[in-house]
Amino acid sequence: MQTEAKQAFSISDELANQIDQVLAAHDHDATQIVGILLEVQDLIPQQYVPEAVAFYIAEKLPIKVSIIYDCLTFYSSLSDKPRAKYPVEICRSVVCRVNDSDSLLDTLKKILNIEVGEVTYDGRFMIEEVPCFGACDVAPAIRINGKVYGHLDTPEKVRSVLSSLM
Amino acid sequence: MSSEVRFITKNFGKYNPDSIDSYISIGGFSALKKAVKMDGEDIASVIAAAKVKGRGGAAYDMGRKWSQARAVKGEHKLVICNADEGETCTFKDRELIKNDPFNLIEGMIIGAYTVQARDGYIYMREEYRHLRPRLLSAIKQAEEKGFLGDNILGVKGFNFRLHLYSGAGAYVCGEGTALIRSIEGKAGRPRMKPPFIKVSGAFALPTCINNVESFSIVPHLLLDDSNVYTNCGNGESIGTKLVSVGGNVRKPGVYEVPFGTTVREIIFGLAEGIPGGRRLRLVQFGGASGKVSDERILDTPYTYDDLKAAGVDVGTGSLLVIDDRTSVIDFLRYTQAFFSHESCGQCTPCREGNLHMKLLLDKLAAGEAHPCDIEKMKKIANIMTLTSLCGLGEAAQNALLSAMKIFPEVFAVGGAH
Amino acid sequence: MEMVHLKINNIPVEAPKGTKIIEAAKLIGIDIPHLCYHPDQRVKARCRLCSVQVAGKKKLLASCSTEVWEGMEVFTDTQVVRDAQVGILQLIMADHGGNCLTCSRNGTCELQALCTRFNVLDPHLPNVNKKRQAVNTNPSIVRDPSKCIKCGRCIRACKDVQGIEAITFANRSDKIIVTTPFDIPMEKTDCTLCGQCSLVCPTGAIVEKDDTQLVLDALQDPEKHVVVQIAPSVRVSIGDAFGLEPGAIVTGQMVTALKMLGFDKVFDTNFGADLTIMEEGAEFIHRVQNGGVLPMMTSCSPGWINFIEKHYPELLPHLSSAKSPMSMFGAIAKTYYPKITGVPVDKIFTVSVMPCTAKKFEASRPEMGRDGRQDVDAVLTSRELIKLIKYVGLNLKNLPESDFDSPLGTSTGAAAIFGKTGGVMEAALRTVYEKLTGNDLPELEYKPVSLDKPASYPQLNQVRPNVREASFELGGRTFRIAVVHTLLAARLMMEKVKNGTANYDFIEIMACPGGCIGGGGQPIGTTNAKRDERIKALEKIDKDLPLHKSHENPDIQKLYKDYLGEPLGEMAHKLLHTHYRKVCLMYEFH
């Protein structure tokens, strides 16, 4: 099953070109692999680094693909599995939780009709639980593609954030 | 009630953080100009005299650190700014980078001059990626103006370049050796010490790591002719401190307070107290790895020594305020879940210990714990503290162990909690 | 050497500066418990089991990573230390899957031994093992992540010894795992199946694929005529498992055990090794005299063959086309042997005992057989042979010696040294030199060579270069040769060959450190110190044998006269030579 998904991803010339540019911007410096992967992940619509892309980067840098895989699975902000166009990261650390992020999570699940880790059928949204992203002064908060949305203490506010992305 | 002091944050709102000219117009880089006329050892002495302690959490004597880093022999040395602010309820560095990026850069250049470093790295957590463009632009502008590059300010041989590296969502990368591994392009798993970072840090080069706030103090301190900083606080706790207050308070945020301000003044004055007429359950000091107390701590002056005597630490300078809607056990479970998620997983006590602690706390919360489970918790906590490879495993149970002292009734299995 | 004075459990100890506590303790006979520590590897300090108390220190210190200092006072047996050791073992056991009784490392497991030592019978904690499935996708190596204790020894062996990095840590916290990138089956990664990972694993998380049952079944089958061949290095390694000194020579006892196990004939891979020299030596002479591709490279080590097919396919023409001794022997055992004995080929079951996991894969290559039959039906590692011997209740210590059976059991000293780095080169040159000059090969003076890290592999961590070179004069020409072991060194050498700076005529390459005596299928507990003892033992066998040149082996001479004809001749070519192919990687970008 997983191999099917893997093989489904092929690197278009355009993507290869974009990746080459990222690598060039980092001087093909393998020590910058974490930054490179973050930028490449942004190029992929589903916000992840597919296996084929990892092998591509490994060959071009060059670097061992095992180092890339270790990084992809070690760092929470990187993913080796498809996510969504808008991964909705909800902070589950203690500051947000004492500000009722439980209700925020319930609201998200209800509106999007998915559970944590699931992707909406159109591939647009998914819910991910993450630890503190440093927005404790606006708790409870979510973060979508790097942007923080805070003070989400009513369903209306959540709805308005999500609809702003549509 | 109490008012803030503006020393480290004195530039906030005073200039356009995207423009170096704007920064220069308010006197930016005059500290650097002063510094390059000084001997590096004298700069370290100024910091040591002001008793500045590292603001990342470990509170190591910063003047001493720079002096030691300066003494390390090496053709190629590094300074690193640890902007991987990952402790929960800590967001002061975010404010410093957002509002005053050039001051941080100036502090790092002075640091490089002092310890004779050739390259500098800012390792910023991915969660602050929205601040990346601002920092990158600031670095570029500083290069264009000649504050970064070769022969800075005409000082022959004072060459320094600054690089911005991104974390990628790993709390443990705030630990020095993990941060270094991450900069080297690896998964950020800490390594054993020695070799110590100051001798063999990133790329095996002598390295001096400081926190954002630590670097940010330096330019202000060098120009502090009227001793605003040293007139604050007393004893070992001199100057001001940025505190991040969050949780169940009306006005969460970052406040700069003089050491000696009471905890009550911070929580109920600056942060305007707990909303909804609810009562204080507990305060956690210094991030997820910090210790807790309850209302007994409110009148304690916020200093290194007074807090320590009261059983907690300054740590990163955060105060997480929790009201009576959250039980002690739930707070501990949330904290434990954080560590179970963030342990790097390589050393046995931290990897396995955090997991079992989480299970035992769940058992306690469910009312199914036996006295032997409490003993197991203590035992595992003890092993983690004594044998973990790095500070994460060593400090992960600080909240639990301090809670056991402050709230013994919660752990009296069979009793009311 | 600067000496440091310390006390361990109040006993004065003197140790060279730089010594770690764990090694200093060994000096007075104290074995501090450890799992991630390995004497041949860089410090990891992960398992924390070796934590000890040091006067003046609040925390316990890991004795594998802490250097001794003057006046240090170490305590290895206080209550605090014991509690930590037992506690850590309990934490590990609570995350351990599987059952000792069904584990192939039962009896050789370091975790099991420590639990026995500390009487950790019950972890008193819930089992939190993720129960991941074992991965059994290739003929050589089985990975069982549920038994992994995340010590990282395998990763270090793969990276620091072999320079391959086919396995890595992934994930973090309690989800951390040792795996291949993207969980790709091992054989499809950069892995060469060399098995060095399985040699250092303290538990049963990475083991050889067990074929003992296959062999036992064949032995019980009255229809089968089961013959066994034993690689040169096994006779100096398996004594370890029976309480003998490292490097003990147990050839005769081993033959007795195999006969008692019920093998119909006990033959010697060394016969195959002599045969290899006949072909490989002739091929070298042919290449030199006819402007063939040089440097020629040896082809005995299957880990090395897998490596070059995957990573340097453009250099395949450098490989000698001669099969390995095992495969040559297999071919003879399925052709010549039935012819001279009358045993029908369909009844013959050939077993080989190898120091190697990659040999299991080599035997399964389709080119290593004919008429729908493989030449070698089962490959056992040294470790599996030890199990079989123990299975029937034998101890090599107590057995008399026997001789190999004839005719495929005769061999020379040249074959014996095949098991050590440099041995194949030496054996080949003894024959080549004499064929061309009529004289004995002069003693070669090897010099160590240090190879540069290639720019294209910035990640490569050069720890031991493991390359030597020598030269000799022959017919007015200077011949330059090189001997390489470990794949890390092989990669560095291949970069040199590729960029045209390897000015050699002949290169011997062995995948494993020290050659086959350090192979990935050797007994658990193989260390560099033991490797050195085994090398000495092979040199002794060579010295003690009457014949030292492969072409002097009378049974080899008879084989050519009666059956094969000439080296490199048509029959020899058909049976004793092979071809190589580029292995397509999972992804290739242009």
Image (cartoon, coloured by chain):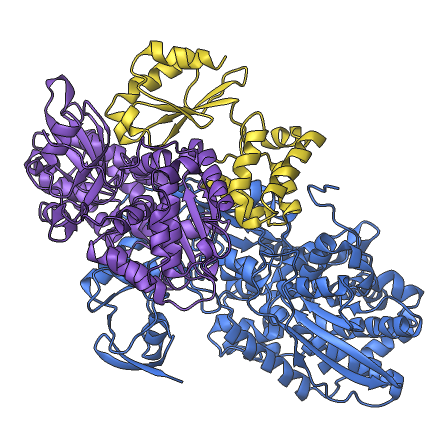
Chain colours: A yellow, B purple, C blue
Residue C235 on image: x %, y %: 60, 74
Residue drawn 90% across the image and 72% down it:
C286
- Looking at the image, the residue that sits furthest to the top is A156
* Viewer-closest of B304 and C105: B304
Residue C464, image quadrant: bottom right
Residue drawn 50% across the image and 12% down it:
A166
- Quadrant location of the C terminus of chain C? top right
Residue B243 showing in the rendered view:
yes
* Viewer-closest of B117 and A10: B117
Q: Is residue C486 above or below residue C540?
A: above
Residue C479 on image: x %, y %: 81, 80
Q: Is residue B306 above or below residue A18?
A: below
* Viewer-closest of C368 and B355: B355
Residue C553 showing in the rendered view:
no
Residue drawn 59% across the image and 56% down it:
C212
- Quadrant location of the N terminus of chain C? bottom left
Residue C175, image quadrant: top left
Tell me if A86 is positioned left or right of C27 in this view.
Answer: right
Q: Is residue C359 above or below residue A133?
A: below
* Viewer-closest of B334 and B238: B238
Q: Is residue B217 above or below residue A119?
A: below
Residue C551 on image: x %, y %: 82, 80
**How many discs mark residues in the rendered view?**
0
Residue C196 on image: x %, y %: 56, 61
Tell me if C160 is positioned left or right of C445 in this view.
Answer: left
